[in-house]
Image (tube, helix red, strand yellow):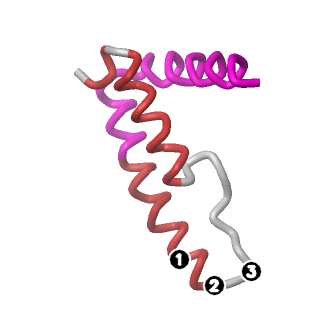
Amino acid sequence: HVLAERPGRRFVWRFLAEAGVFRTSFHPSGSVVYYNEGKRQIGLTLLADLMEADPSAYLTMAQEAQSDEAKQA
């Protein structure tokens, strides 16, 4: 149900971004790497669930996020 509406997809996309799914976990401080990887693992789990539930939702979310970013620029 969350993926069926744009506000739900926006929430999931923001969660994935905050979790660090789209960036590296590397940091010069080892303890920060562990923290980042923990967040990223939760995001990757959500992404795997999303891909199992509705693979086309990922593409839709990416397109909507790109559109939203273009409007803000």
Q: Position of residue 65 (x, y in %)?
A: 59, 24
- Please name the residue shown 60% across and 17% down the image: 63
Q: Identify the image quadrant of residue 57.
A: top left
Q: In the figure, 47 relative to 19: above or below?
A: above
- Does 39 sit left or right of 32 as displayed? left
The label number, if any, that marks residue 30 in the structure image: 2
- Does 12 sit left or right of 37 as displayed? left
Front one among 34 and 55: 34
Q: Please, what is the three-letter code of the amino acid marked with disc 2?
A: Gly
- Please name the residue shown 48% across and 34% down the image: 13
**Circle 3 residues within 10 Å: few <14, some 14–19, many ≥20:** few
SS state under label 1 = helix
Q: Please, what is the three-letter code of the amino acid marked with disc 3?
A: Pro
Say which residue label 1 marks. 34
SS state under label 3 = loop
Q: In the figure, 48 relative to 20: above or below?
A: above
Say which residue label 3 marks. 28
| N-term mark: 1 or 3 | 3
Tell me the quadrant of the picture where the N terminus can be found. Answer: top left
Cα distance in 3D space between marks 3 and 2? 6 Å
Front one among 41 and 35: 35
Magenta residue check for 55: yes
Q: Identify the image quadrant of residue 67.
A: top right
Cα distance in 3D space between marks 1 and 3? 11 Å
Front one among 40 and 53: 40
Tell me the quadrant of the picture where the C terminus can be found. Answer: top right
- Predominant SS of the magenta segment: helix
